[in-house]
């Protein structure tokens, strides 16, 4: 079965937590979702994909490049990152920081992810020394 893909609608900061808001009918079952503790990269869609699962299979939460500045801030501040649906249910993405650290490090200087993905990642997550 194909993973279900949901795009984040918006982000919100509350008490040093970054909330990734999803407002899709599917997200009403958030209480049944589990954290798979891993992330994938969608180079074509310029997105990081956090993987969740339920009894039916996998749910992919797409974090598009317009939200990366918040993701970077969450990494720097070691903030908790939590997915939230419109009825207020929450699920903490426990592996967010470690996975993002690993992927953003790995993508820089790695042509396999495609030039546009690499450039965007360097722009937001890169450091001057790394870009040399």
Image (spheres, rainbow, N blue to C red):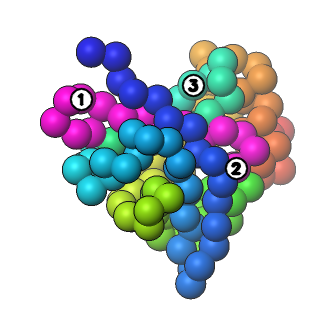
Q: Nearer the viewer, mark 2 or mark 1?
A: 1
Q: In terms of depth relative to the viewer, which is nearer, 5 or 28? A: 28
- Mark 3 and 1 residues: CB-CB less than 8 Å, in contact? no
Q: Which residue is mark 2?
A: 67
- x, y percent for residue 35: 29, 50
Q: Mark 3 or 1 closer to N-term?
A: 3
Q: CA–CA distance between discs 2 and 1? A: 26 Å
Marks 3/2: CA–CA distance: 14 Å
Closer-to-camera residue (62/121) = 62
Place of residue 31 in the rendered image (x, y in percent of width and height, measured from the top left): 27, 56
- Residue at 57% x, 38% y: name it: 7
Quadrant location of the C terminus?
Answer: top right
Horizontal arrangement in the rendering, residue 84 relative to residue 14 (left or right): left
Q: Which residues are magenta?
A: 53-68
Q: Residue at x 69, y 49 (%)?
A: 68
- Residue at the disc numbered 1: 57
User: Would you say residue 13 sits in the magenta stretch?
Assistant: no
Q: Secondary structure at mark 3?
A: strand
Can you name the residue that lies furthest to the left here? 55
Q: Quadrant of residue 71?
A: bottom right
* Foreground label between 3 and 1: 1
Q: Nearer the viewer, residue 97 or 36?
A: 36
Q: Secondary structure at mark 1?
A: strand
- Across and down, in percent, residue 11 comes to 64, 59
| Badge 3 or badge 2: first in the primary sequence | 3
Which residue extends farthest bottom? 15
Q: Is residue 56 magenta?
A: yes
Please give the label number shown on residue 42: 3
Image mark for residue 125: none
Which residue corresponds to the image point at 74% horizontal and 55% vertical from the top-left? 69
- Label 3 crowd bin: few (<14), some (14–19), many (20+), radius 10 Å: some
Q: Earlier in the sequence, mark 2 or mark 1?
A: 1
């Amino acid at each position: 079965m194909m993973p279900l893909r949901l795009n984040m609608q918006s982000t919100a900061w509350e008490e040093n937590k970054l909330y990734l808001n999803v407002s899709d009918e599917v997200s009403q079952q958030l209480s049944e979702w589990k954290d798979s503790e891993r992330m994938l990269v969608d180079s074509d869609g310029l997105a990081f994909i956090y993987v969740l699962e339920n009894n039916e299979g996998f749910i992919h939460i797409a974090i598009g490049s317009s939200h990366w500045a918040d993701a970077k801030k969450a990494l720097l501040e070691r903030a908790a990152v939590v997915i939230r649906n419109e009825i207020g249910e929450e699920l903490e993405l426990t592996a967010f920081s470690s996975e993002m650290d690993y992927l953003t490090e790995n993508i820089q200087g790695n042509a396999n992810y495609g030039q546009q993905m690499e450039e965007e990642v360097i722009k937001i997550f890169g450091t001057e020394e790394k870009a040399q």
